[in-house]
Each structure stands twice: as structure tokens, then as C-alpha cells.
Amino acid sequence: MSYRHGAVAAAALSIAMLAPAGFASAADLPVKAKAKPIADAPFFFVIDDRLTYSWMPKGTDPGQFSVNPNGTINGTTAKSVYSFTHFDAWAYGTNFFTISMFKSDHNDPASPCIAPGLTSSFGAGNCAGATEIYGLIRSTFGWNEIFNTKAFTVGPLHNISFEVGADGNSENNYLAPAKRDFVAGLQFAFDLPYKGYFNVAPLAYKEINHNAFNQCGTVFAFGPVPGFSCNADGNTEFKTTWAVETNYYMDLGFMPENMQLFSISGRLAWYGPKGDANGLPAFSGVGRFSNATKTEFNSEPIRLTFDASKAVMGPKYSHFVDLWVAYRYWQNKFGLDHNAAPGVCTIAATGQSTNSCTESTVYTGITVKF
């Protein structure tokens, strides 16, 4: 029990003991005077868990593409996405965690195919679409809470926080990518009208990855010399770089009361160049043959959400069931230069784009709170 709660309980006992004896017998007094303990506040005062299914008709996976009969290139792949998200708030900050499963169509095939319709032995093969698991966690520690002050709430600025986090993925395609990255920095939280917010976080970003594209002995290896023309284990440690992550949310509270069922949200994130994509000095290249990473822009600039449960069951059930539609834009996906990275983002011989290193798609889904 906290000191404040203990003091309130003690005061209640003292007041009860001062009551005139005529109100109760001596035997009754201890029972009448006993105060009911006040429960401590829960450790997490906000817990929000949700499940989402979404359909993405034009997703991409760098290097995965097919050639149409007329010679054009199809670098998109439809994906079904199944997600779990968790958010909580406690005395000193917040935690956000999400894990998603992306199930692709045949244009992004699982192993042993190395491309649509082509196995690693260069024979014909009709492989199932790849499955990717991707997880992300971000935690904040508020300066107002740590220092027990309101000094970091000024005008629209709501708080400044330390932020740390990590991402990780695994995919069952031939390249078997296994990304691990870590971020640390600050978050500046601002208030928006209609219960809205806008957060911006400048961060340091460090990535370690595995990818068989540069691994010795695979069909994609550039040569037989470990550390020069191929990588012995396929692991690459990238240079630490910068990142900026932002997100926002706002109810459309300016609409008539009976139409206040919509909200908008979104996110924008930039990740700086992190070195050579293959980590191989012999194949860094120049111009359209370069494997140097570029600034990555990963965004969902707008999501329009309809609060279906509020519309059907009333305000008590607000956001228990949401229907939404969003636009997703991802340039230089995974840091790969969409104008270079031969064999992945472009056709090595011609420089023609594979259309697989930029993702531009409208997608939609349903989210259920439980």
C-alpha cells in the first residue's frame, strides 16, 4: 500500500473511533471502526490488445519478380497479413509490441524456389508463397514521470521521453533473411485537437542481418573468396546510422455528433544509409551497379478508420471493432537503392527496374480489441 493510501486509511480509522459510544456497544466498536483497505493502483493502468487481418494487393519483396509475356515486369505480390498488437502504459512510460505474419502469393515464393517458377537447381517449380514473421517493440520512459515534474509539458508539447526498441524478422524463402535491429533515442510527444497526438522520435539505428544473397556456396554468390566476393555465413553487420520515426492519431471530432465514428492515423519513418548492402568490397560498384544502401522511407501516411462497434452498439464499445483503409508507401525497401542494386532492384544487364524495391499499395483490414 502506498503512503498516501495508508494515510487515508489511518484517518478513516481515527474518525470512526471518535464516534459517541451510544451509537454502538463496546463489542461493536472495533468492527464498526475498521476501514476497508484501499487497493493500490494497478502496475499497468492501460492495457490494450488487438488482433488484425489485412489484405495488401500490391506488396513487394526485393528481388522477387516475374516477367510478363509482353516483356513487362511484375514486381508486386499480394499478401494476407495477420497481426497482434499490444500497448500498455505504466507509471514511467509506455510499451508497444506488434508481431505480424505476412503470407505472400506465388510471385514471392518460398524455398526451394529462388524466383517464381524456378527452383535452386534451375528446374521448374511451383512453390507456395513465402511466409514472413516480423516483430517490433518500442518502449518510452517519460521525463515528466522520471523527474516528477511538469517542466516538459509546454504548449502543445506533452512530454519528452527516452525511447528504446528493436525489430526482428524471419522468412522461409531461399534467401532466408533474418533481420535484427536496435534503436535508441528520444521521443517528443505533442497534443493534437480532438484527443489526438503526434509523436516524433530521432533515433540511432543499428542493424545486423542474414541473407543468403551474398553467402558463399549459394547460387547468388559473386565468387569463392570469403570476405571479398562472398560472405562465409551470410551475416552482415551494418554501420550505425540515424533514423526518425513519427506517428499520429486524431478523431474527426469536427464532424456532426452522429457522424463522429471516424478517425485518421498514420506514420512516417526515415532510416539513413547503413553501408554496402552486401558488405563485400569487391562488389560495391558505382552508378546503377552500386550496392550502397540509400535512405529508406517507410510510411503509412494516412489510415481512415471507421468505429464499427460504436456505430452498432454505442459509445461504450468504441473501437472494439474497427474497419479501416490505408495507403502504404515504402521507398528503397530495406535500404536497397531502387535505382541500382543489380539483380535485386534492377535487371543487371539492362538496368530495368524490377519494381520490387518500392512498395505502393492501398490496403484494408479489420481490427478487433479483446
Image (cartoon, rainbow, N blue to C red):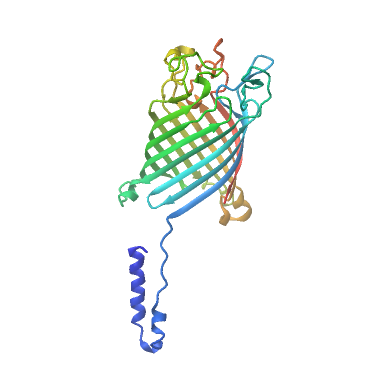
Give the answer, above or below, for where 245 lies relative to 284.
Answer: below
Left or right, 142 with respect to 52, comes to: left
Q: Quadrant of the N terminus?
A: bottom left
Q: Which residue lies furthest to the top in this view?
A: 349
Residue 22 visible in the displayed image: yes
Residue 198 spot, x, y in % from top left: 43, 41
Q: Residue at x 41, y 85 (%)?
A: 28
Residue 316 spot, x, y in % from top left: 56, 57
Give the answer, above or below, for where 14 lies relative to 239.
Answer: below
Which corner quadrant of the image does residue 362 belong to?
A: top right
Give the answer, above or below, for where 235 lies relative to 50.
Answer: above
Left or right, 247 with respect to 316, comes to: left
Which corner quadrant of the image does residue 361 belong to?
A: top right
Residue 130 spot, x, y in % from top left: 61, 30
Residue 158 visible in the displayed image: no
Which corner quadrant of the image does residue 344 belong to?
A: top right
Residue 364 spot, x, y in % from top left: 61, 38
Give the answer, above or below, for where 47 lies relative to 213.
Answer: below
Who is closer to the viewer here, 54 or 282?
282
Left or right, 153 with respect to 223, comes to: left
Q: Residue at x 48, y 43 (%)?
A: 97
Q: So how many labels did they put on this image?
A: 0
